[in-house]
């Protein structure tokens, strides 16, 4: 009877969820969705026993439960795989980074603060079975609690891999790529500054009668994970038939950095090709006019 009740209380074994898993085996449609709607759905751990172990702390085991039924072994596997996946990802994504910068970026992706954020979004902490001493320490030691939250996420990743040897790695790869992508664009790549971007942009589109301006693009914000101020700047172009055309926007730890970021985005704007073509036509016409004026001047001198 006790075993039957335990299985009834395991959310992964109910009949409606089995039907949903059949529709999409990599997504648990029945579990609590992340509070941040931009995050992807939580993948399912197919094996109910592994799902239970991923949320069971060793300190909460009773005398009859084997040690391997707790989250510590799954955490070990999840930690190792997340480290490898993060290293592989940043190595491929940032060929311009030094090894030191690669290590720094990898650590940012898998640090307890980052993983704890995912844990709370998916409410994995609300499923966790923790010993009373941990629950008490949670109220007084935020760093300790962040570590526990990170462990829970690593254990969940390990659970996905262990319970689905054929597809588990691919499921984690896809899931983490979606989770990390916003961090690349808002936390990592804000720091990859091309300090020649403004000059490169001016060289491509500036000519007589044109203007490039860098303007504030919203209030100062706080970085969600690093706690630093984030400035937003947009770059606008006037001339050649355009008026305050926004070519790009960027963010940075100060206005100068944000301006470089905005210019970098402008350099990737497809409309830049159109402006460059108009600039070339304008410059050719201007040069032709100068040549005609020079010939007229030379003709006047000869006639005199």
Image (tube, grey):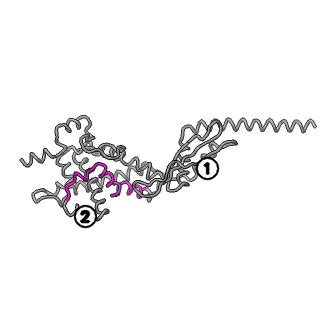
Q: In the rendered view of the protein, which quadrant contains the C terminus?
A: top right
Given residues 250 and 297, the one toward you in this image is 250
Distance Cα–Cα, label 2 vs label 1: 54 Å
Q: Is residue 301 left or right of residue 62?
A: right
Residue 35 position within the rendered picture, expressed as x and y whole percent measured from the top left? 32, 47
Given residues 15 and 24, the one toward you in this image is 15
Q: Is residue 257 magenta?
A: no
Q: Is residue 190 left or right of residue 134?
A: right
- Say the numbered circle drawn on residue 137: 2
Residue lying furthest right in this view? 304
Quarter of the view holding residue 7: top left
Contact check, label 2 and label 1, Cβ < 8 Å: no
Residue lying furthest left in this view? 1
**Residue 60 against residue 218 in the figure, above or below:** below
Asked which secondary structure carries label 1, the reply is helix
Q: Which residues are magenta?
A: 102-130
Given residues 85 and 160, the one toward you in this image is 160
Where does label 1 land, which residue? 199
Residue lying furthest front in this view? 219
């Amino acid at each position: 009877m006790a075993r039957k009740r335990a299985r009834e209380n395991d959310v992964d074994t109910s009949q409606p969820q089995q039907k949903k898993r059949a529709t999409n085996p990599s997504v648990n449609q029945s579990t609590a969705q992340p509070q941040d709607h931009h995050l992807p759905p939580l993948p399912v751990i197919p094996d109910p026993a592994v799902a239970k172990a991923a949320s069971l702390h060793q300190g909460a085991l009773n005398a009859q439960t084997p040690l391997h039924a707790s989250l510590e072994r799954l955490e070990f596997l999840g930690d190792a795989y997340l480290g490898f996946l993060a290293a592989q990802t940043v190595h491929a994504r940032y060929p311009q980074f030094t090894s030191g910068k690669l290590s720094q970026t990898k650590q940012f992706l898998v640090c307890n603060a980052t993983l704890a954020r995912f844990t709370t979004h998916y409410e994995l902490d609300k499923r966790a079975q923790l010993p009373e001493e941990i629950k008490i320490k949670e109220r007084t030691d935020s760093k300790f609690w962040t570590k526990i939250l990170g462990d829970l996420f690593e254990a969940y990743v390990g659970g996905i891999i262990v319970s689905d040897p054929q597809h588990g790695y691919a499921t984690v790869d896809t899931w983490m790529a979606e989770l990390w992508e916003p961090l690349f664009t808002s936390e990592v790549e804000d720091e990859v500054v091309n300090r020649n971007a403004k000059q490169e942009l001016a060289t491509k589109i500036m000519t007589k009668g044109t203007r490039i301006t860098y303007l504030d693009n919203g209030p100062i914000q706080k970085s969600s994970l690093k706690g630093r101020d984030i400035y937003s700047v947009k770059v606008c172009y006037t001339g050649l038939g355009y008026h305050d055309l926004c070519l790009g926007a960027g963010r940075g730890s100060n206005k100068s950095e944000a301006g470089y970021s905005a210019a970098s985005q402008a350099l990737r704007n497809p409309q830049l090709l159109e402006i460059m073509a108009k600039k070339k036509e304008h410059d050719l016409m201007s040069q032709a006019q100068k040549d005609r004026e020079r010939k007229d001047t030379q003709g006047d001198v000869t006639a005199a």
